[in-house]
Image (tube, rainbow, N blue to C red):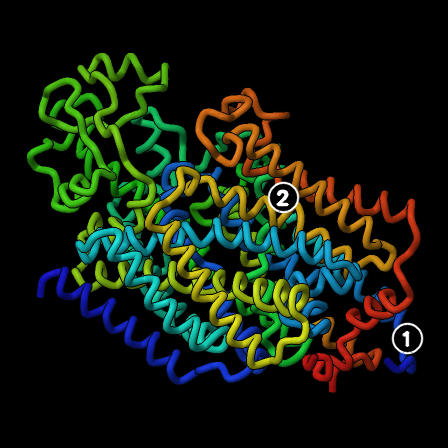
Amino acid sequence: MSQEFDKSGYWKANLRLVGLCMTVWFIVSYGFGILLKDALNSFSLGGYPLGFWFATQGSIYVFVALIFFYAWRMNALDRQFGANED
Amino acid sequence: MDLQTLTYIVVGFTFALYIGIAIYCRAGSTGEFYVAGTGVHPVANGMATAADWMSAASFISMAGLIAFLGYDASVYLMGWTGGYVLLALLLAPYLRKFGKFTVPEFIGDRYYSKAARLVAVICLIVASITYVIGQMKGVGVAFGRFLEVDYDIGVYVGMSIVFIYAVLGGMKGITYTQIAQYCVLIFAYTVPAIFISLNLTDNPLPQLGLGGMMADGSGLSMLDKLDQTVTDLGFAAFTEQKGTTLNIFLLTASLMIGTAGLPHVIVRFFTVPRVSDARTSAGWALVFIAILYTTAPAVGGMARLNLMDTIQTGEVGDPAGNLAYEERPQWFRNWEATGLLEFEDKNGDGRIQYYNDANPDFAATAAAAGWKGNEMVKVDRDIMVLANPEIAKLPNWVIALVAAGGLAAALSTAAGLLLAISSAISHDLLKGMIAPQISEKQELMASRIAMAGAIGVAGYLGLNPPGFAAQTVALAFGLAASSLFPALMMGIFSKRVNRGGAIAGMLTGLLSTLLYIFWFKGWFFIPGTEMLANTPDNWFFGISPEAFGAVGALLNFAVAIAVSRASDAPPVEIQDLVEDIRVPRGAAAAVDH
């Protein structure tokens, strides 16, 4: 491997991004869907109690968005640090 | 045309399609056999991953679980999708960069140890074999119910189809067949759901229908109506939590970590051309999975409502409010014939009472109405998806489609698992340990023989299901979560974890999880050998055996880090390897051995 780019800066930026995404991942599923479900159920989204909606629908939509967000940001990081494949 | 002829035509057509694809996509090299020559487009790979992942359990059992467990079944929805976030962020791109063929190969190289590789191979084979038994059973059941052939013949037909396209095509054939299978299964799953959602709520999107208003003019929302219908008969409300929060939390975590650690899923991300493709491909996989998973709550909830309304046709307590047994619909009779639905006229009134007779608060209401116990003595959860189109009075071609969809789900998962097993045997055991000198051609032949052998073993176990077949999900996910996932993740994110730490960690996770599962389910699942009855009162802190994988994973992390800290850092070339897999650049060159 060539050393012409800032490997440790690239890795730190990646870890920050992973940390951010994992935090959101935890909040929507374990937070909204499980631990805070009862509190959120006093609100509703259409006919869904909100906590129930997060557990059965919302968390899954957020997971999908998170993966694409991560891929998009990482591709940008790859280019910024010159770590990309081509 | 009658249902059976129609089902034969639909299922026959899909099988012909799978075989045609297999002949078109033969594998010519080990690279094509193990990882489809790393030439699969990320969207196509996402679709294949979705079919690989969604098994008979996702297609048939999950909506049934939701129907009867309500909110508590959301652990499966979150657990089996949230794992893809872990995969996409923590494993897939780095393992693709590593650029080899199997999961044990990474563990063996990263921890510079054949012993570590062997532990990984054992976990992989045990997890995959247990998992594949369920698929073979699913194939047999689907054939038995829809084509009215023997269970055994169903298993043989399933084995032959998988044999043709998996042995011939390897990962390449499997990938393109899985894409076709995804299309069949998702169509078969969503079409009945759309019809049922339209019937009940006038909304064609089941995801919105479940949160919509009832179309019957009652002015109630779908979920309120469902909660009311079930609580009127003494059952717990659909949206209410029944289990303990700790267990729901840990079960979700175990399923997520287990999903990310299952080798047959991970290896799918070795097939895409570039590291950045591995990232987006995980996203596409989850999109295709989410279409089914977000539909499942509606399928489960609406099936439950339709079932209750079919039996309790009027007011609770009014003798005429219960369906007369003689007037039961045709689907009821069909499923009675399979033994999965059973009725017993306990109070001899010729009508069906379906209520929760274990609920003390409801006993007075039941006694006043002259009810003498729940008369639906058996309602198998697995029939909900299969019976759903019949319960909702949908046309025959929809029912035929559901049969083909169930088979597609079972076959696509079985093929993925069989590939993981055969490559672990030919690549990790044979080429990696026993006979490193064999040529590529010999290895390719060995992998085909291993695949044929694995199909034989899976078929044998499908024909003679061991008593523990139903328990295997806990085992497969437990092993993947407690042993494989932590080793893979630490291998990427830590340069400090060394050989001794990884082996100690994997064994700790593996053995603690096995011990906990066997403690409550019997040693090697032999009935009568369990140390404590498998009830929530006996569980350690109320943690069910299925939910223990997350604890095993934590133990694995803790032991691996502690042992590594107390011993020398890994050699410099291993630290360089870790540095290298963290950066996408140079991935294309890494493919060749």
Q: Dot 1 falls on which chain?
A: A
- The residue identified by callout 1 is A6
- Left or right: residue B575 compared with residue B91: right
Check whether the beta carbons of the residues at disc 2 and disc 1 lie within 8 A of each other: no
Report whether residue B212 is seen.
no
For the point 33% across and 76% down, the residue is: B19
Report whether residue B339 is seen.
yes
Q: Is residue B305 above or below residue B271?
A: above
* Kind of residue indicated by mark 1: Asp
Q: Dot 2 falls on which chain?
A: A
Residue B302, given in percent of the width and then of the height, sits at 32, 46
- The residue identified by callout 2 is A30
Residue B239, given in percent of the width and then of the height, sits at 45, 37
Q: Is residue B178 above or below residue B86?
A: below
Q: Secondary structure at mark 2?
A: helix
Quick one: label 2 or label 1, which is nearer the N terminus? 1
